Image (tube, helix red, strand yellow):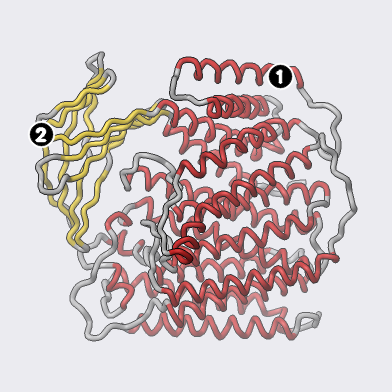
Amino acid sequence: MILNYIGNFALFFCLILSSIIFFTSILVLNNKNSFFKRNLNELLFFKFFFTLLSFFSLVILFINSEFSNETVLNNSHISKPLFYKISGTWGNHEGSLLLWLLILTFCAFFYFLKSKNRPSDERLLTIIFQELIIMGFLFFLLKASNPFNIIFPVPDEGMGLNPILQDPLLAIHPPILYLGYVSTSIVFSSSLAALMKGNINNLWAKDIKSWVYISWTFLTLGILLGSIWAYYELGWGGFWFWDPVENISLMPWLSLTALVHCILVLEKRSILHSWTVILSIITFTLGICGTFLVRSGILNSIHTFANDPERGLYILFFLFFLIFLSILIFFIYEDKFETNNKNLNFYSKDFSIILNNWFVMYFLSVILIGTIYPIFLEVLSNEKISVGPPFFNKLIIPFLIPFLIFMSIGPNLKWIKNNKLSNKLNLIFLFILSIVIAIFVFKFYSNVTLNITILLAVSFYLFFITIKDFAKRNYKNYSQMISHFGFSLLVLSILLNSIFSNEVTSNMRVGDEIKFFDKSIKLQRLENTKEANFLKLIAHFKIEDKDKIELLLKPEIRIYDKPETITSEAAIKTDIFRDRFLVVNLVKENDYLNVRYQEKPFMIWIWISAILISLGGIINILKKNEK
């Protein structure tokens, strides 16, 4: 029980230190010889140390199944495997926010350690904004979401963690996603600080660029891991379902993607000062907005943790405060930009980047409206609706076509001005080839619409262009080429997956066989086994095609005791061309199983493409002495 007090007191020490750093920094901001400035690094380290102490106190409480702690009681039990006891630390509302705080304090410490080349007043201002965010989360933790609340008398057993969260991939998904979310706070704080000091210029862009890449890369990896988990664990049979919390993570990724390219333009051309700051504010705001929507329980999703209006109200107030503060600072200090009033040329790489930025912000707006509109409608009219794939497809696909065209042409333009495209004949040939392939698909597959045919053509075009770019052997831009190639492969794989996917659903019992297309599926037998904390029903299926090639798949139904939950574990056979995906569910009061079999082409390439996109970011982070 003593760890409850240690963790709690550590949080209070963090709040005291954060308050000291915040208020003292304001007082000594213009004092060049301040003792405080010289020792700020140590104070930031101690604050991070106390946060780390609090976090590991909670981890040990979970490992020891200390049910005197309310968070442990609600999210663990004795028989849960050790790995999931540890991951259960952040698999709940209170623990996940403590992890947020840990990353926040680490980012503040690491930024101050690595930013010695920046002006001292700008660094101090960045820490002031960072401490403001940290204090906001500390107050929230201690007042409304304390992970160290004590229960008395102490129960003998806990309530357990949601079984679908007991997965190795999901155990590492939140920390990686949070690294992406929380590191945007440094970009936000630094942009406001540099704005106030009139330092939004190419030198600032070069220094903050690494933080933008860190945020973007971790957020990409976090979304990828979450998508893979949902694919095989939830039994939905796909990689993206426009679930509200999926959208919440996608929106800051889109604004970060726009920011990555704007930072490059600001560094190369010393333009887009205002837009870069605005994107920095938008990106962090979307991260906090996602925290509000998920932690308040407003969104109806498997990902949501809490359902407490008081918690949601606090985060909403804090969000509005940060937005108001950042907008106020922007309008007051906007005239401090060091701008050279350079004109943009239509036939230039920088104009192409700006144009694609507009498209990205349009996509973001569509997703934002589709995510929050049902919430406002329910508040105003008490009417519940869900916004699904048809809404997003109708509004996004038509604009995705010109977006991909400009993304194909942009890298072949020059900075500042370009009167003609380089390698024009190659570009024309690849465009014609792409159209021919798309027409061939349209002719032989009746389910392909004209919109999808055009999108397929420009997707092939981008794919061919990004392959061609590797032939230039421009090693300085390899990271960009890898990410662009990964994105082109992602779009193409998603399109081909949607066009060529097949599915059959039926109720079956042992001995039944169903036929579809040129295949047959037979349920051979059922097998029961007992694991540590669940019963497992294994269904043995034989899938046979016209050439008598057999495939055995063994999907599972798991029945957990704490809490009492039934889950389905899909059986997936993967090769380089397709996934064979089979999932079963119990049919109540019947001896039948509901069987869903899908063939999903190019699924492995969707995952590989997302890894390549992340790899480009990782290479950029690791680059040194880039000119």
Residue at 47% of width from left, 46% of height from top?
224
Residue nearest the viewer, comparing 362 with 134: 362
- Relative horizontal placement of residue 183, taking residue 269 as reference (left or right): left
Is residue 270 in view?
Answer: yes
Residue at 10% of width from left, 30% of height from top?
511
The N terminus lies in quadrant: bottom left
Residue nearest the viewer, comparing 293 with 259: 293
Residue at 49% of width from left, 75% of height from top?
313
Amino acid on which the number 2 mark rests in the picture:
Val
Q: Where is residue 619 in the image (x, y as percent from the top left)?
A: 61, 44
Q: Is mark 2 on a helix, strand or loop?
A: loop
How many callouts does the rendering have? 2
Dividing the picture into quadrants, the one containing residue 109 is bottom right
Crowdedness of circle 1 by 10 Å Cα count: few (<14), some, many (20+)?
few
Dividing the picture into quadrants, the one containing residue 77 is bottom left
Question: Is residue 298 shown above or below 428?
Answer: below
Residue nearest the viewer, comparing 267 with 476: 267
Q: Mark 2 points at which residue?
A: 510
Q: Earlier in the sequence, mark 1 or mark 2?
A: 1
Residue at 76% of width from left, 70% of height from top?
122
Residue furthest top as drawn: 547
Amino acid on which the number 1 mark rests in the picture:
Ile
Q: Where is residue 479 in the image (x, y as percent from the top left)?
A: 64, 40
Q: Where is residue 236 in the image (x, y as percent from the top left)?
A: 34, 43
Question: Is residue 297 shown above or below 45?
Answer: above
- Relative horizontal placement of residue 574, taking residue 608 as reference (left or right): left
- Relative horizontal placement of residue 482, taking residue 207 as reference (left or right): left
Is residue 218 in view?
Answer: no
- Relative horizontal placement of residue 232, taking residue 144 as reference (left or right): left
Q: How far apart are marks 1 and 2 (CA)?
A: 57 Å
Asked if the residues shown at circle 1 and circle 2 are in contact, with their CB atoms under 8 angstroms apart, the answer is no
Q: Name the residue under label 1.
A: 428
